[in-house]
Image: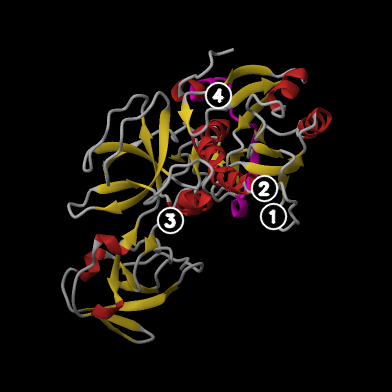
């Protein structure tokens, strides 16, 4: 087991060390939005499959329209989905519409605005054909060309391209199932009556949102009382999930039973307690193939720990490179005192300064039990252990509060 008070970076590395990507499943295009593509996609066809007119006008031989005006015999019509089957000979023209195949023999399009025509003939009176009026076969892509790389979270542009490439289904990573279990005799669900010593359980609902946004599938297993037998049963009920998140009960008090119960069930404990504020009582281990994560019960602590540790775990299970630890620079909106021995994630609001720089200002209170300041925040200011005092205007590091 890792030593107590592990650094945030080492704790995250331990969690990701054995995070193998989930299995692959094939889903129809309609269900592929925001899924993670498991393998690269190559075109199954050429696009466009033939030379296509980009304009409404007339398909002609370029040599017939070098000297204007000129009158050509109109021999037929080509529209999208309805090509003209004969060849175009010298002195002939075919009425053509945008998206129609360019007939054999024709190598230029005269736009309609430069002509006068009736049912039998067309007279080209002005202009000259432009190469861009014909989109050549394979102008977009060709059969077998690899166009979409993996892994990647699919967006509307990817899905549209995949459809045009001829793919009806896409290979994606199965969404990791994340079991969420709140613990504590003091908790009741929102909407239920509360006793004199009880509080409303809020953490699982926010963490479920974090899980969904990261690409996982949250499964709520309710509230477990501070009872060994009940905790053991609830953990066993979640055996088919990839990750089990216990919220609360991971500290060292007499009623903090999560760790002992999981170890009784056979969990291999990687670490317990990290040098982080808020979020010191964080626990991680493996129970068979399952990732077991114990979050603090404090609402703000559990949300921030989910952002810093659970999100990269889900990303890794999806085959993505974990990016949640990437910081960006900002300007301190007010002075901050020197940091203590733990890495501190301070809630902050973001604004744009007069010089265009991003400004991060700590919220009114950093108390880890207060949810209303958390809701005001846009980002987390990352203070390393023993970080010196910061003056207003100093450069600092932040991570987005993207939940």
Distance of mark 1 from mark 4, alpha carbons? Answer: 31 Å
User: Which residue does the numbered mark 2 point to in the structure image?
Assistant: 201
Q: Magenta residues?
A: 12-31
Please indicate, yes or no, whether residue 216 appears anywhere in the rendered image.
yes
Left of 355 or right of it: where is 402? right
Q: Quadrant of residue 184?
A: top right
x and y, in percent, of residue 165 in the image:
50, 49
Q: Secondary structure at mark 3?
A: loop
Q: Quadrant of residue 383?
A: top left
Image disc number at residue 50: 3
Q: Residue furthest bottom?
A: 118
| Eye-nearest disc, 4 or 2 | 2
Left of 232 or right of it: where is 387? left
Q: Earlier in the sequence, mark 2 or mark 3?
A: 3
Distance of mark 2 from mark 1, alpha carbons? Answer: 7 Å
Q: Earlier in the sequence, mark 4 or mark 3?
A: 4
Q: Quadrant of residue 252?
A: top right
Verify whether residue 394 appears in magenta. no
x and y, in percent, of residue 136 in the image:
35, 55
User: Which residue does the numbered mark 4 point to in the structure image?
Assistant: 15
């Amino acid at each position: 087991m890792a030593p107590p008070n592990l650094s945030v970076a080492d704790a995250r590395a331990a969690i990701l060390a054995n995070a193998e990507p989930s299995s692959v499943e094939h889903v129809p295009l309609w269900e592929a939005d925001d899924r993670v593509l498991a393998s690269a996609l190559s075109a199954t066809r050429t696009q466009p499959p033939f030379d296509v007119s980009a304009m409404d006008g007339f398909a002609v031989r370029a040599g017939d329209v070098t000297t204007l005006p000129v009158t050509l015999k109109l021999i037929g019509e080509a529209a999208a989905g309805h090509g003209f089957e004969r060849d175009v000979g010298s002195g002939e023209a075919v009425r053509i519409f945008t998206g129609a195949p360019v007939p054999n023999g024709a190598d230029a399009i005269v736009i309609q605005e430069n002509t006068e025509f009736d049912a039998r003939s067309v007279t080209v009176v002005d202009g000259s054909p432009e190469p861009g009026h014909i989109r050549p076969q394979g102008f977009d892509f060709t059969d077998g060309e690899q166009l979409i790389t993996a892994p990647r979270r699919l967006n509307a542009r990817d899905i549209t391209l995949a459809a045009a490439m001829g793919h009806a289904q896409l290979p994606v990573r199965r969404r990791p199932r994340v079991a969420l279990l709140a613990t504590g005799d003091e908790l009741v669900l929102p909407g239920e009556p509360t006793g004199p010593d009880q509080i409303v359980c809020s953490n699982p609902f926010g963490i479920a949102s974090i899980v969904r946004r990261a690409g996982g599938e949250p499964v709520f297993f309710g509230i477990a009382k501070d009872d060994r037998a009940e905790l053991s049963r609830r953990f066993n009920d979640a055996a088919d999930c990839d990750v089990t998140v216990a919220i609360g009960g991971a500290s060292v008090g007499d009623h903090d039973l999560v760790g002992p119960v999981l170890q009784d069930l056979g969990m291999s404990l990687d670490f317990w307690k990290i040098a982080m504020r808020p979020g010191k009582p964080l626990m991680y281990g493996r129970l068979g193939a399952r990732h077991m994560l114990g979050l603090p019960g404090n609402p703000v602590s559990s949300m921030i720990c989910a952002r810093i540790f659970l999100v990269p775990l889900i990303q890794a299970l999806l085959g993505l490179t974990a990016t949640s630890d990437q910081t960006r620079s900002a300007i301190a909106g007010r002075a901050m005192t020197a940091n203590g021995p733990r890495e501190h994630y301070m809630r902050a609001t973001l604004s744009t300064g007069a010089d265009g720089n991003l400004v991060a200002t700590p919220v009114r209170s950093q108390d880890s039990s207060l949810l209303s300041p958390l809701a005001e925040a846009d980002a987390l200011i990352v203070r390393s252990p023993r970080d010196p005092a910061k003056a207003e205007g100093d450069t600092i590091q932040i991570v987005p509060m993207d939940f």
